[in-house]
Image (cartoon, grey):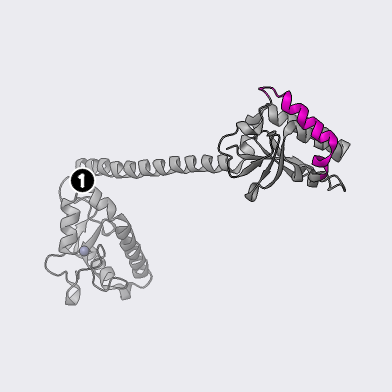
């Protein structure tokens, strides 16, 4: 089925579908001249003669609308295939462009001149109208969104790969394990004791990690998030035994998946340290 394109006459739309123009659109665009409605024009003897002539002298170039497949049920074609009445949102009387130009002549000289130029150009270069259709635009957007999603997937893979590289680099740079200092442990424990964690594991939120007195429960660990050689407070968090297992043996992807939780926890650590600097007495 031919998509509907829209031409414009002084800002008023004139729909075009394949080789057919919407006559009511033309009538409205030309300023609704009295006694020149599409039906008036169709009733003229001159119009009937033109249709009869076109019907017998049709050339391959001026293909009648009957050649359009898929229009059954939507178009009620007149016998000669030059004029069609359509149902639905594309409704109204449509006429082959050559007849439509003849109709344009009855509407006004200015409109006729416009139609002669613009309609003819549209019929000769149908490709130029493609961008005027909403459907190709949507199709174009769908393609761009698919590309965008592919790129995001790629970026995520790259980020995960970068983490492996960073871990390998750290291995070379930092070497062996360094435990968190007493001071760092106390800071991390204070953060996990406070809201919103209330002593629960900041990684899964399911298990308790803190016992009374701010000590870690048996099984819970201060996890080195980036590398076992990086022991500053911003590189660790206290996690429950199941989380520690997952993070230690799950590979870099398991760690990568917990990045949001770790960042949220570290935001609290930062806040806690800032407060400790402002009122040193409170933090201890
Ligand atoms: Zn946990």
Q: Is residue 74 left or right of residue 260?
A: right
Q: Residue at x 22, y 50 (%)?
A: 227
Quadrant observed for ligand 1 in the rendered image: bottom left
Is 11 part of what is drawn in magenta? no
Q: Which residues are magenta?
A: 40-61
| Direction bottom: furthest residue | 212
Q: Residues within 10 Å of mark 1 (few under 14, many from 20)?
A: few
Please identify the dominant SS of the magenta region.
helix
Q: Tell me the quarter of the image containing the N terminus.
A: top right
Pointer 1 residue Cβ closer than 8 Å to ligand 1 = no
Q: Tell me the quarter of the image containing the C terminus.
A: bottom left
Q: Residue at x 34, y 62 (%)?
A: 264
In terms of image quadrants, where is residue 6? Answer: top right
For the image shown, how many numbered marks are present on the structure? 1
Q: Residue 175, image x and y in percent?
A: 17, 45
Q: Secondary structure at mark 1?
A: helix
Q: Is residue 68 visible?
A: yes
Q: Is residue 186 above or below residue 122?
A: below
Q: Residue 147, image x and y in percent?
A: 44, 40
Q: Residue at x 23, y 48 (%)?
A: 252
Kindly identify which residue carries mark 1. 174
Q: Nearer the viewer, residue 202 or 49?
A: 49
Q: Residue 250, image x and y in percent?
A: 18, 51
Q: Is residue 257 above or below residue 140?
A: below
Q: Is residue 118 visible?
A: no
Q: Residue 61, image x and y in percent?
A: 67, 23
Q: Nearer the viewer, residue 274 or 119?
A: 119
Q: Is residue 153 left or right of residue 192?
A: right
Q: Residue at x 85, y 40 (%)?
A: 107
């Amino acid at each position: 089925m031919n998509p509907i394109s829209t031409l414009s006459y002084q800002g008023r739309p004139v729909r075009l579908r394949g080789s057919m123009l919407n006559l009511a659109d033309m009538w409205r665009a030309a300023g609704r001249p009295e006694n020149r409605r599409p039906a008036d024009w169709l009733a003229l003897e001159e119009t009937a003669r033109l249709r009869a002539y076109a019907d017998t002298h049709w050339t391959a170039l001026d293909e009648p609308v009957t050649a359009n497949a898929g229009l059954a049920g939507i178009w009620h074609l007149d016998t000669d295939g030059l004029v069609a009445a359509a149902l639905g949102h594309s409704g109204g009387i449509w006429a082959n462009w050559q007849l439509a130009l003849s109709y344009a002549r009855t509407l006004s000289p200015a409109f006729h001149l416009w139609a002669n130029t613009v309609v003819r150009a549209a019929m000769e270069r149908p490709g130029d109208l493609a961008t005027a259709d909403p459907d190709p635009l949507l199709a174009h957007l769908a393609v761009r969104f698919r590309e965008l999603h592919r790129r995001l997937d790629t970026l995520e893979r790259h980020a995960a790969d970068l983490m492996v590289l960073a871990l390998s680099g750290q291995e070379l740079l930092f070497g062996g394990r360094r435990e968190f200092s007493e001071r760092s442990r106390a800071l991390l424990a204070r953060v996990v004791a406070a809201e919103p964690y209330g002593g629960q594991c900041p990684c899964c939120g399911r298990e308790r990690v803190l016992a009374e007195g701010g000590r870690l429960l048996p099984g819970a660990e201060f996890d080195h998030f980036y590398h076992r050689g990086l022991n500053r407070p911003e590189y660790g968090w206290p996690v429950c035994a199941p989380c520690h297992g997952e993070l230690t043996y799950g590979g870099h992807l398991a760690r990568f998946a917990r990045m949001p939780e770790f960042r949220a926890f570290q935001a609290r650590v930062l806040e806690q340290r800032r407060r400790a600097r402002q009122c040193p007495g409170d933090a201890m």
